[in-house]
Image (cartoon, grey):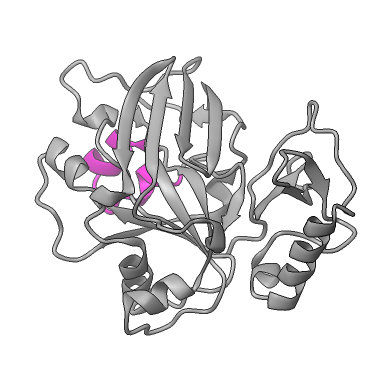
Amino acid sequence: MKLLRVGTAGRERPALLDAGGTLRDLSGLVADIDGALLADVAALGRIRAAAGTGELPALDGTGLRIGPPVGRIGKVVCIGLNYHDHARETGAEPPAEPVIFLKAADTVVGPDDTVLVPRGSVKTDWEVELAVVIGRTARYLESAEEGLARVAGYAVAHDVSEREFQIERGGTWDKGKNCETFNPLGPWLVTADEVHDPQGLSLRLWVNGELQQDGTTADQIFPVGEVVRYVSRFMTLYPGDVINTGTPAGVAMGRAEPKPYLRAGDVVELEIGGLGRQRQVFGGG
């Protein structure tokens, strides 16, 4: 299933994109697409059954904003340097263990919402990423297979980063990762049963119409199941939590000088095969 949330920010309602491309209203069946729903096997079954009968009312998507596909996110866990080609372009050694940092849940916005270039920023960068959404509580998992079994679904994420704040201002990466609007998510949450191989997905990103990133999750250093297993050894993952699993090569930081960092007015488009497409116009913070 392709689950999504539509409407004005903070007032989104649950919806489904059916196999024929029609937007369907889920608000008569469930209150929201969130961790409580993703952990409720019976509720998900009711949605599947209703979708199969065609009884869900259609929604007119004209002019309708698409919000983040998951509401009330508890935490956003991010994995750094998780693609071989991205490590090479930044001059970093592939990590022996996953690099973990956090983004605040309030950085998450809709897939087509405006992204704000922070005040004083000179190095705002792009990163297309596969996002994993947790559906079952994960703690101290023993295997990658157990990790995959905890995944409710997948989505497109844009891990926007300010490299000067992240790298040159001391301390942890958090200052360059948690600026307002720095995690567009969506358009859909595609349930795990529709993603047969999370290590076989194409990722692409364009800036002002020019292709900048063109990669595949097959290049991940730590695959999805192992990422979930590893993270569960250090923190408990709850239904509705999100993991951004890293970005392939092609970021501005990896380019020759002058590096083409983002400015207000730039347009970024990104997609992951089968998971949908985002488009953001960057604005001033």
| Image quadrant where one finds the N terminus | bottom right
Q: Is residue 159 above or below residue 145?
A: above
Magenta stretch bounds? 161-178
Q: Position of residue 275 (x, y in %)?
A: 53, 44
Q: Is residue 123 visible?
A: no
User: 244 or 123: nearer the eye?
Assistant: 244
- Where residue 9 appears, x then y in whole percent? 73, 42
Residue 167 is covered by the magenta coloring = yes
* Residue drawn at 62 percent across, 32 percent down: 113
Residue 105 as seen in the image, left or right of residue 17: left
Name the one closer to the observer, 100 or 275.
Answer: 275
Is 170 included in the stretch rendered in magenta? Answer: yes
Out of 49 and 43, give the one closest to the viewer. Answer: 49
Q: Quadrant of residue 211?
A: top left
Vertical side of 204 occupied by 40: above or below: below
Residue 40's x, y, as percent?
70, 76
Height in image: 119 above or below 151?
Answer: above
Does residue 40 appear anywhere in the picture? yes
Residue displayed at 32% across by 32% down? 214
> Based on the displayed image, in which of its 4 quarters is residue 64 positioned?
top right
Q: Residue at x 32, y 56 (%)?
A: 79
Q: List x then y, in percent, for residue 121.
A: 38, 27
